[in-house]
Image (tube, helix red, strand yellow):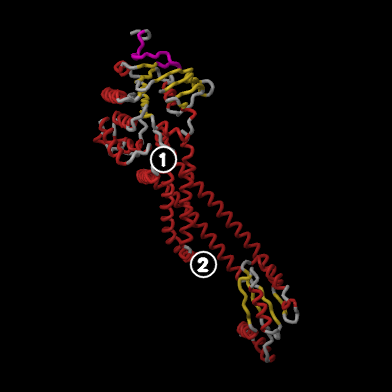
C-alpha cells in the first residue's frame, strides 16, 4: 500500500531530518512509530501527507508517486487519509457536528448521508450528546475524540495519528487507543506516532523505531523498548 | 459533486463564517464603508468640478454681428449650416429688433445713449448669431468652419466676429480647466488606489485571522474552491453591506453639505446631484464594493492555498 524508497529529507543543506528511509506498509496494518523528539517521525508523516516533499527518494501510495501529483489532485489524495493531530487542528468556528460534517462535504456526500452518518460517528467516540458544542467548550480528550471522528468519518484507507495521546489523561488515552484499534479491525491501516510506551506495549503490533532520521528497528510484533536496548 | 450542491455549501459556509466572526466582519465592513465613502466623495468632487467648469464655459461664446441690411434669409441659412457643425452645442439667432430692445434695456439708465438713439430715430443695430460650443476647446475648429462660409467671408454681410477678441479668455479658460481637471483626476486616482490598498489590507487581516482554519481544511482534503469560495462570498457580502450603509449615510451628509456647496459653487446642491444620480451612484459604489470584496479576498487568500 505505502512504499518509502530511499527517502531523505534535508533542511537548508545541513539539517538532515530523514536519512535513506526504506519502508513498506501493507493494507490493514497497525504501525506504532516511535522515537525521541526530533527523530524524524513527524517529518515522515508530513511527507506521507504531501505537506512536505522528500529531498531524495520517492513515496508511493497504491503504486502512485504521491509527490508527482498535480496540485489539483492532492485534495483527492488527502481525502483517502484521515489525520489526527496532537494539537487536534479542529475548526474553532464550527460546532462538533460541523467539524465532522465538513469532512463529508469535502468529498461530495449528500446532506441526507451526512445527517445519518455524523451522529453515528460522534456516538462511536462518545460525543453524541455534545453535537452543538464548539471545540473550545470541550476538554482535551473530547477534542481529540472529535478529531478522530472527523478522521474516520469517510472511512479512509489510512489513518495517521501523530501523538494523539500526548496531552491527555490516562482514561482518555485508553479510550482513544481503543477507538484506533476498532478502526483498524474494520480494515483501515493505522500509523500511530507516539511516545507512550504502555500504549505500544499493549497494542502488540508492528513497531518502527526512528532515531536521528533513520529506522533503527522494525519489529513485526514489537514493544516500545527493544529487549537489547531496554536495560531495565 | 453537483454544482448546485457545491454552490449551496460555499454560500452557507460564507454566511456562517461571516456571522460567527462578528468582530472581523464588523471591522471589515467598517473599513470598506469608509473606503466607499472616500470613493463617493471622489464622485462628488468630479461632479462639482464639472459643474463649476461648465458654468464658466457657459459664459464663453462667440457672436457673428451682421450689418443691419443683411437679409434675414442669409442669416437663417448660415444658422442652419452652423448647426450642422459637430462641435456646436447651440446657435441662437438674435434679430435686429431684439438686439435693439436688449440694448435699450441694458442702457436704460444712460441718458446720453437714450438721447442719441432718439436722435437717430432708426434701429442702427444689426442681427447676430450667438454660438456656443460643446467644449470650450472647440471654438477654434468652429470658427475655422464658419469662416469658409461665403456669407461670412463676404464682408458686405458680416460686420465683425468676436472670436478673436475672446480668444485670450477662451485659451486661458481651457488652460485653467485642464489644470483643474488634471488635479481632480490625480486626487481621484490617488485616493482610489489608497482605498483599494486599505480594503486589500483589511481582507488580508480578515483572512489571516482564519489562516489556521485554512491549513486544517487543506490537510483534511478540502479543494481550493471550497476554501476560496466562502471567502469570496464573505468579500462580496462585505461589499454589499458597505454599499448599503454608504448610500444611507450619504443622504444626511449631502443634505448637510448642500448649504456649503450652494454658496461656494454657484448654486450647486450636492444633495440634488446625489438624488438625481442615485442610480449611477448605486451602480458605481455597489460595483466597486462588490468587485473590491471579490478580488481582494481572492488576492488575500492566494498565499494560504499552497499547503
Where is residue A95 shown, x and y percent of the image?
31, 38
Q: Nearer the viewer, residue A228 or A31?
A: A31
Residue sitting farthest toward the left: A129
Question: How far across and how far down the image is residue A97, in percent?
Answer: 30, 37
> Is residue B218 shown above or below A188?
below
Image quadrant in which you'd find residue B82: bottom right
* In this picture, residue B102 sits left or right of residue B66: left
Q: Is residue A225 visible?
A: yes
Marked residue chain, label 2:
B
Picture quadrant of residue B103 = bottom right
Residue at the disc numbered 1:
B226
The magenta stretch is A209-227
Q: Chain of mark 1?
A: B
Q: Is residue B83 above or below residue B291?
A: below
Disc 2, SS? loop
Q: Earlier in the sequence, mark 2 or mark 1?
A: 1
**Residue depicted at x 49% and y 57%:** B284
Q: Are marks 2 and 1 on the same chain?
A: yes
| Image spot of residue B44 (x, y percent) | 51, 60
Label annotation for residue B268: 2
Closer-to-camera residue (B91/A116): A116
Q: Quadrant of residue A130?
A: top left
Amino acid at each position: 500500500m505505502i512504499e518509502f524508497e530511499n527517502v531523505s529529507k534535508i533542511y537548508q543543506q545541513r539539517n538532515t531530518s530523514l536519512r535513506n528511509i526504506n519502508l513498506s506498509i501493507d493494507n490493514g496494518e497497525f504501525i506504532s512509530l516511535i522515537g525521541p523528539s526530533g527523530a524524524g517521525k513527524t517529518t515522515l508523516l508530513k511527507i506521507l501527507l504531501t505537506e512536505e516533499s522528500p529531498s531524495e527518494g520517492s513515496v508511493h501510495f497504491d503504486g502512485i508517486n504521491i509527490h508527482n501529483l498535480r496540485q489539483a489532485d492532492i485534495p483527492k489524495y488527502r481525502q483517502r487519509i484521515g489525520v489526527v493531530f496532537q494539537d487536534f487542528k479542529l475548526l474553532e468556528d464550527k460546532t462538533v457536528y460541523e467539524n465532522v460534517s465538513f469532512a463529508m462535504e469535502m468529498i461530495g456526500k449528500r446532506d441526507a448521508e451526512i445527517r445519518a452518518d455524523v451522529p453515528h460517528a460522534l456516538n462511536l467516540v462518545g460525543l453524541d450528546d455534545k453535537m452543538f458544542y464548539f471545540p473550545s467548550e470541550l476538554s482535551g480528550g473530547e477534542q481529540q475524540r472529535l478529531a478522530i471522528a472527523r478522521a474516520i468519518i469517510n472511512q479512509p484507507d489510512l489513518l495517521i495519528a501523530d501523538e494523539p495521546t500526548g496531552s491527555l489523561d490516562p482514561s482518555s488515552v485508553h479510550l482513544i487507543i481503543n477507538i484506533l484499534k476498532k478502526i483498524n479491525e474494520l480494515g483501515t491501516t493505522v500509523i500511530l506516532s507516539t511516545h507512550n510506551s504502555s500504549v505500544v506495549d499493549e497494542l502488540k503490533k508492528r513497531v518502527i523505531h526512528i532515531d536521528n532520521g533513520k529506522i533503527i528497528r522494525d519489529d513485526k510484533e514489537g514493544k516500545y523498548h527493544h529487549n537489547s536496548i531496554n536495560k531495565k | 459533486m453537483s454544482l448546485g450542491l457545491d454552490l449551496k455549501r460555499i454560500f452557507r459556509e460564507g454566511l456562517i463564517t461571516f456571522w460567527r466572526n462578528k468582530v472581523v466582519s464588523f471591522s471589515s465592513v467598517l473599513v470598506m464603508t469608509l473606503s466607499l465613502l472616500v470613493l463617493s466623495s471622489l464622485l462628488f468632487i468630479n461632479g462639482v468640478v464639472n459643474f463649476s467648469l461648465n458654468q464658466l464655459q457657459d459664459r464663453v461664446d462667440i457672436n457673428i454681428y451682421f450689418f443691419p441690411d443683411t437679409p434675414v434669409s442669409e442669416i437663417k441659412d448660415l444658422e442652419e449650416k452652423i448647426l450642422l457643425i459637430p462641435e456646436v452645442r447651440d446657435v441662437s439667432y438674435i434679430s435686429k429688433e431684439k438686439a435693439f430692445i436688449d440694448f435699450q434695456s441694458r442702457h436704460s439708465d444712460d441718458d446720453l445713449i437714450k438721447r442719441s438713439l432718439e436722435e437717430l430715430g432708426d434701429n442702427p443695430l444689426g442681427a447676430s448669431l450667438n454660438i456656443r460650443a460643446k467644449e470650450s476647446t472647440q471654438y477654434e475648429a468652429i470658427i475655422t468652419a464658419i469662416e469658409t462660409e461665403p456669407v461670412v467671408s463676404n464682408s458686405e454681410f458680416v460686420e465683425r466676429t468676436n472670436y478673436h477678441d475672446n480668444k485670450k479668455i477662451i485659451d486661458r479658460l481651457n488652460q485653467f480647466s485642464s489644470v483643474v481637471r488634471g488635479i481632480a483626476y490625480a486626487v481621484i486616482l490617488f485616493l482610489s488606489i489608497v482605498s483599494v490598498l486599505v480594503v486589500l489590507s483589511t481582507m488580508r487581516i480578515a483572512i489571516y485571522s482564519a489562516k489556521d482554519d485554512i491549513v486544517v481544511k487543506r490537510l483534511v482534503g478540502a479543494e481550493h474552491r471550497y476554501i476560496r469560495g466562502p471567502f469570496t462570498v464573505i468579500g462580496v457580502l462585505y461589499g454589499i453591506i458597505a454599499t448599503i450603509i454608504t448610500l444611507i449615510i450619504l443622504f444626511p451628509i449631502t443634505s448637510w453639505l448642500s448649504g456649503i456647496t450652494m454658496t461656494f459653487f454657484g448654486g450647486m446642491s450636492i444633495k440634488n446631484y446625489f438624488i438625481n444620480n442615485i442610480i449611477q451612484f448605486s451602480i458605481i459604489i455597489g460595483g466597486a464594493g462588490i468587485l473590491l470584496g471579490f478580488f481582494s479576498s481572492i488576492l488575500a487568500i492566494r498565499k494560504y492555498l499552497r499547503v
